[in-house]
Amino acid sequence: MTKVLKAGALWLAITIIVWLITIWHWQSNAHDASTGEIVGQLFVLPVALTAFLLLVLWAVKRLRAQAAAPVVPVSKALDGAPTVASVHAVSDEAQRSLSAWVLAEAVTLAAGNDAGAAWAGLRSQTVRPELDSELQDVDGLPIFTSRVADLDVRDWLDAHAELMQEPALSEPVLRGLALLEAPLHQMLEAVRELTPAATSADGAGHAGMAAGEGASTGHMKAHLSGVAAPVNKAQVQARAALAPHLTVRLLLPAQWAPSEREAAVEWVRSQCGSLLDWAEAHRAKGLRWQTEAVERPEGLWDEVDRQIVQWSRDLRPELLLILAVDSAVNEHSVDRMQAVGELFTSSHQTGKVPGEAAAGLLLANEHWPLLAEPAVPPVRMWRPVRATRDKSADAAGRVGAAVLGAALQQAMALNQADKDRLLVVSDADHRASRTAELFEALQEVVPGVDPMLAVTRVGESCGDMGLARALVPSALACTALRAGEVPDQVAVATHVQSSHERVVVALAPWGAALAST
């Protein structure tokens, strides 16, 4: 119905313009128009022009959608044998369907201090940004923020005397570490619960297969007792090759001073002694830390995508623990946002609301040994679908949804989503441009879906979460899928806050993920 109204409005506008120009031309030249000229120029011409413009708009939309979606060539030779193009097509399809397992997630948000409470608060639609009693804009007026409730940095600092040494950390850094503490320890507990026996048994099984005949041709190692003990070098090498590996990716705000970032990294590492115990119990190959700064939240998904592809080339069981924290609820961040025109105020309601959050995700590659009936069912996460808009979403005029629609279509093809069992968790906030783009794209890809029921906009309740919004939508979607309120429900996490970059992550619960493989 909306498309019909738009086409009718276009025809009416063209008709008015044609009539004005034609009648003015006839009157200025004292032209006595015939019946054919009246019908042709006043009635047929507006209809023809309208049809032509609609055809052009349709063609442009198709071209943009094709440009956003990857073209997979599939062809066969005349005798039925696959050509090089078809081989590459199969390879590309297999690459696109690579995935990982989400073993655990954690968040601290204004909506709740853990993932379950935050999801319940968001679904209740009772969480909203509030006027801040401490922060003001340049005009001296209070601003809206989304603070995490009951977080007193001074009380928290009293319990962490190690952070009170000189040089003292700034208030934003201390607040960020306080936000991160709960998700950090929840992730550490999730790692500790991964039993070494599962990996050892799996590694031994693989090692035995890889050793082959090496078991019967093992070398003999002489001992002082004179008794020779058999040592199978092939088996030892195979076990070493399949020893698990753990990577910790820590995302801290780039605005923090380098010295404060280093101090924050050292504090986080000091809390992770249990990871060393885990690595020793698993006979892990190593524990690697990655703490490089990223300028934008979407940049993390570039890393995750490369990691999933790399995992597919190695049979080693691997874990990736991602932690992110950010807070704009401080005077410096508010001043910076207002200076660049990003702050939501009474006179600038297209700005962002300062928020804060911390989040964690524990990912495992497809070679990680999973129990037949795990206590906490994992969630399957496919490679993120990334796209870039040509036109800024903040530009004047209508915001098109073709790029986001193409990304949604690719993601939903992976987890086989439909309108009756689809959950969308997005970082979209109060800005009409982001909501309109998401809703339009969703209705184009999944006709009949009700966006008001299917979509949960975290940004609307929790504001701009900075770097942490890279993880929050996916973490909350995993929490919802584990709850299993809707049978066979699948989810997509969407990132639309950026002016140009779009990211869609397809997710499916344990049972549905096994059925789709």
Image (cartoon, rainbow, N blue to C red):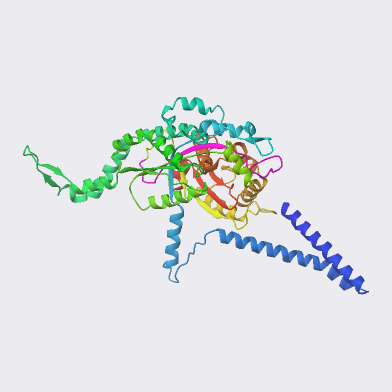
Task: Say which residue appears at 64% left-offset and 63% top-offset.
Answer: 60
Percent position (x, y) of residue 340? 62, 47
Percent position (x, y) of residue 6? 74, 55
Instruction: Say above or below: 441 vs 263.
Output: below
**Side (left or right) of 318 relative to 224:** right
- Quarter residue 275 falls in: top left
**Side (left or right) of 481 relative to 125:** left
Q: Camera-side residue: 476 or 176?
A: 176
Q: Camera-side residue: 19 or 336?
A: 336
Q: Camera-side residue: 13 or 5?
A: 13
**Side (left or right) of 209 relative to 298:** left
Q: Is residue 345 magenta?
A: yes
Q: Camera-side residue: 402 or 394?
A: 394
Q: What is the tally of numbered marks visible in this picture?
A: 0
Percent position (x, y) of residue 427? 58, 43
Determine if residue 219 is in view: yes
Part of the protein shown in magenta: 342-369
